[in-house]
């Protein structure tokens, strides 16, 4: 007979991908997901479930979600220096690694939101309006296609509680659903083109062109995590956003910048090596844009904090 440790180890290896994807969507930070999956494994080895002759996925999911909810609560209690943005992750062109074999009933992911949409910045930022329990319920029900009963078992709550929490979570996502733009092939092409035009105009010093690419109420959000120089509040308005990025471009030595366009979180983004800068300037970062239905850029995001870039290859 295999030992409990070997059984847990095999189950963990089988379901590691599912656990990581759950924890990433729960926290929005890849480095936190790494830590939470590792802690789940340690918990499984130190205090394994009483029975290891049955499917261990539900038990592992419950442990991981409890740890993720605690992590999310701790993050929200701590003061954060400046605006908060999710940590980018690298994804294939229009797809995240398949998880179908790990899902309940070995089925496919046919929830309200698919795996790709549920890692987009727009979706992860919308999740920030939810409580940790609402976030867990919404992800299990609407992304990973868990039934009410499976969700109740995963969270150790009643089915009635799941239904109530799910209703409130969906209500909190109403603004996202109203403006929802899933990462289709068309949106990827549009985002890639607008990102290239925006950065080209910024580094060419073409103020008029930069402003023309931005919506009137465009917003720039920079997440330096208190580690590097970054705007401590979002910058609002096309003229101010254009000026903000032109001033940043002017701080860098010509020819020092290296840009690489990749698909991050389901949409094209730029992985940037900024080269040598002044003290406090970030050496690397990810720059991305959100394009509205009118074809104009409504948000520009700059992720600069080192820990937020842990999942990005430089």
Image: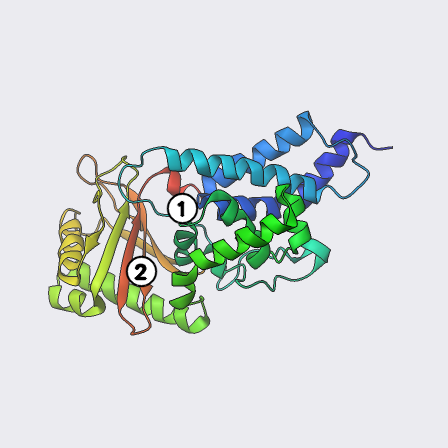
Separation (CA) of disc 1 from disc 2: 15 Å
Question: Camera-side residue: 248 or 104?
Answer: 104
Q: For this view, does 57 lie left or right of residue 28?
A: right
Residue 112 in the image: above or below residue 294: above
Which residue bears the numbered disc 1?
Answer: 87
Residue 33 in the image: above or below residue 258: above
Q: Position of residue 101 (x, y in %)?
A: 69, 55
Residue 201 lies in quadrant: bottom left
**Residue drawn at 61 percent across, 64 percent down:** 110
Q: Which of pointers 1 and 2 lies earlier in the amino acid sequence? A: 1
Q: Residues within 10 Å of mark 2 (few under 14, many from 20)?
A: many
Which residue bears the numbered disc 2?
Answer: 289
Question: Camera-side residue: 120 or 136?
Answer: 136
Q: Is residue 34 visible?
A: no
Q: For this view, does 147 lie left or right of residue 70?
A: right
Q: Which mark is residue 179?
A: none
């Amino acid at each position: 007979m295999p030992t409990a440790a070997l059984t847990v180890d095999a189950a963990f290896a089988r379901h590691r991908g599912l656990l990581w994807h759950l924890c990433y969507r729960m926290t929005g930070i890849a480095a936190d997901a790494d830590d939470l999956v590792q802690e789940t494994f340690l918990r499984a080895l130190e205090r394994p479930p009483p029975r290891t002759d049955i499917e261990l996925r539900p038990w592992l999911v419950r442990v991981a979600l409890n740890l993720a909810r605690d992590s999310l609560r701790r993050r929200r209690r701590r003061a954060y220096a400046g605006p908060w943005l999710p940590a980018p992750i690298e994804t294939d062109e229009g797809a995240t690694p398949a998880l179908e074999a790990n899902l309940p009933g070995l089925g496919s992911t046919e929830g309200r939101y698919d795996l790709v949409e549920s890692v987009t910045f727009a979706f992860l930022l919308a999740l920030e309006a939810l409580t940790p329990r609402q976030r867990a319920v919404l992800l299990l029900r609407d992304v990973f296609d868990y039934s009410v009963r499976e969700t109740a078992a995963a969270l150790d709550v009643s089915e009635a509680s799941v239904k109530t929490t799910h209703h409130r979570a969906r209500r909190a996502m109403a603004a996202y659903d109203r403006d929802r733009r899933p990462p289709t092939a068309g949106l990827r092409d549009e985002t890639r083109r607008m990102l290239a035009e925006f950065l080209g105009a910024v580094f060419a010093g073409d103020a008029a062109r930069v402003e023309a690419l931005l919506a009137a109420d465009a917003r720039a959000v920079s997440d330096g995590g208190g580690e590097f120089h970054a705007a401590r509040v979002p910058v609002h308005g096309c003229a101010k956003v254009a000026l903000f990025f032109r001033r940043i471009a002017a701080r860098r030595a010509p020819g020092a910048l290296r840009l690489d366009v990749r698909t991050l979180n389901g949409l094209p983004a730029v992985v940037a090596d900024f080269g040598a800068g002044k003290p406090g300037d970030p050496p690397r970062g990810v720059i991305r844009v959100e394009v509205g239905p009118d074809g104009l850029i409504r948000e520009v995001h700059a992720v600069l904090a080192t820990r937020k870039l842990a999942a990005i290859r430089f």
